[in-house]
Image: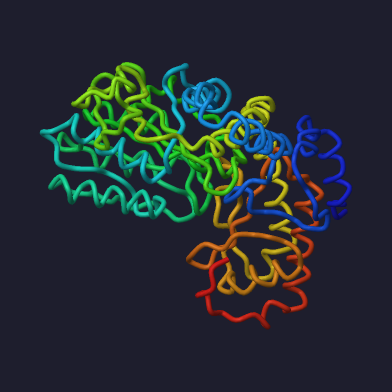
């Protein structure tokens, strides 16, 4: 007997321990199915209130006196991330700059700490900005960027990393969750393998922070970066964060020597003397409004609990794959994500994925398109319901049955 998928979705929503968190977000289009929270999270209601207060009361009234409370915001949010989102200790995480800038700072510092080694290892499906930044670091230092192969659908493997390691590798830099497929890399084992070869490890957490557990301290991770605008709902352009293991902070020196990284910042001294803490990885004036927005988003994730978030994200993805098997595989789709060991998105491959993504938008479903020919569907556990997954996949099934995607151009030049 066929499964009643709508009843199943309603039952899963009724049993969802995170269901109440949906009410914490601004949702003004009840008919919209939003499958792109892994690119930009929804707006928390607390963020709107907090930013209004920051503008009207702090900036508007306090003016420069507001720095009495703003000056420590980067560390404050960093400690909140360390306690509630990633496994780290207070004083190991700090907020500021973009992911690309933080990646550059930490990659440069790591390579400088291994001056006799000439190789950086990454994989060919790492996020483009990571590969570009690492290419630039390698070129500037006369190093080699060793790019290992990874499967587009199942991600980078421990075996591939091990095969690339030798005593000339200074740094291994990979993404914890693959941006295209959602595959989760074996962070503990890869970290251990790199350490056995004498290399440092830098993890990109952009698709894992706020979606999956990140065992930085248990695995002995050296360095990490992550963003706050995806699963942490910090808003467009929200600041990034970086992690530096406590025992490495005094050893590493990042390349951008700014006054917020100075030991005695307001002494305005003649020479740079880096702070003896994670603050040495700061550069300039922190983004206060962006920092407040990130803080509100992180607080929601911390309150929900990363283990519960991961459990729901897995369940949402499992339900989506069941619908794919039943409704979409007959229409030429192929699953481009692991059936287990995923982050909070599922990717489907179809030769007409771009046109299908445009047809979905026309039906009030917002997905994401990724080359080559992949439809990426993000399920944000704090606000995505199982009935929304059902509705979105039902609309997709209707598009395929009617062939309505064919009226959309195959030209992918338009940015969406």
Count of all numbered marks drawn on residues in the image:
0
Q: Could you say where residue 137 lies in the image, as x and y percent from the top left?
A: 23, 46
Question: Residue at the spot x=55%, y=20% of the render?
Answer: 83
Q: Which residue lies furthest to the left in this view?
A: 116
Q: Would residue 19 appear left or right of 185 to someone viewing this image?
A: right
Question: Residue at the spot x=47%, y=28% of the render?
Answer: 74
Q: Could you say where residue 13 lies in the image, as x and y percent from the top left?
A: 83, 39
Q: Could you say where residue 275 lies in the image, as x and y percent from the top left?
A: 30, 20
**What's the image's color scheme?**
rainbow
Q: In which quarter of the image is the C terminus?
A: bottom right
Residue 288 in sight in this render: yes
Question: Residue at the spot x=69%, y=72% of the render?
Answer: 359
Question: Residue at the spot x=78%, y=65% of the render?
Answer: 395
Q: Quadrant of residue 297?
A: top right
Residue 310 in sight in this render: no
Where 135 falls versus 228 (above or below)?
A: below
Where 54 falls versus 145 (above or below)?
A: above
Q: Would residue 415 appear left or right of 144 to someone viewing this image?
A: right
Q: Would residue 193 appear left or right of 85 to someone viewing this image?
A: left
Q: Quadrant of residue 340?
A: top right
Nearer to us in this view, 83 or 256: 256
Q: Could you say where residue 155 lies in the image, as x and y percent from the top left?
A: 44, 48
Nearer to us in this view, 92 or 44: 44
């Amino acid at each position: 007997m066929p499964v009643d998928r709508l009843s199943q979705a309603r039952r899963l929503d009724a049993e969802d321990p995170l269901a109440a968190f949906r009410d914490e977000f601004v949702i003004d289009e009840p008919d919209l199915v939003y499958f792109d929270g892994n690119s930009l999270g929804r707006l928390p209601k607390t963020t709107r209130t907090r930013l209004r207060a920051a503008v009207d009361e702090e900036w508007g009234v306090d003016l420069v006196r507001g720095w009495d409370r703003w000056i420590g915001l980067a560390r404050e949010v960093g400690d909140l991330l360390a306690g509630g989102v990633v496994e780290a200790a207070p004083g190991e995480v700090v907020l500021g700059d973009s992911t690309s800038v933080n990646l550059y700072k930490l990659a440069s510092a790591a390579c400088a700490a291994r001056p006799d080694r000439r190789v950086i290892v990454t994989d060919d499906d790492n996020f483009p900005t990571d590969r570009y930044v690492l290419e630039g670091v390698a070129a500037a230092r006369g190093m080699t960027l060793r790019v290992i192969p990874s499967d587009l659908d199942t991600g980078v493997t421990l075996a591939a990393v091990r095969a690339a390691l030798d005593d000339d590798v200074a740094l291994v830099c990979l993404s914890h969750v693959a941006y295209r497929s959602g595959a989760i890399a074996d962070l503990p084992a890869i970290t251990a393998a790199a350490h056995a070869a004498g290399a440092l490890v830098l993890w990109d957490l952009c698709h894992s922070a706020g979606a999956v557990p990140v065992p930085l301290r248990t695995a002995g991770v050296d360095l990490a970066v992550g963003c706050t605008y995806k699963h942490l709902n910090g808003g467009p352009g929200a600041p990034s964060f970086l992690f530096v293991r406590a025992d490495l902070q005094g050893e590493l020196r990042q390349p951008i020597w700014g006054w917020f990284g100075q030991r005695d910042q307001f002494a305005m001294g003649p020479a740079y003397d880096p702070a003896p803490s994670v603050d040495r990885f700061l550069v300039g004036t922190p983004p206060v409004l962006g920092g407040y927005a990130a803080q509100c988003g992180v607080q929601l994730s911390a309150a929900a609990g990363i283990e519960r978030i991961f459990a729901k994200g897995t369940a949402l993805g499992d339900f989506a794959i069941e619908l794919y098997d039943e409704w979409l595989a007959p229409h030429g789709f192929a699953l481009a994500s692991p059936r287990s060991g995923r982050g909070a998105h599922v990717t489907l491959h179809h030769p007409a994925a771009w046109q299908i993504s445009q047809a979905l938008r026309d039906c009030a479903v917002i997905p994401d398109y990724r080359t080559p020919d992949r439809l990426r569907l993000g399920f944000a556990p704090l606000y995505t319901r199982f009935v929304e997954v059902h509705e979105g996949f039902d609309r997709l099934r209707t598009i395929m049955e009617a062939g309505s995607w064919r009226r959309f151009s195959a030209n992918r030049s338009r940015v969406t």
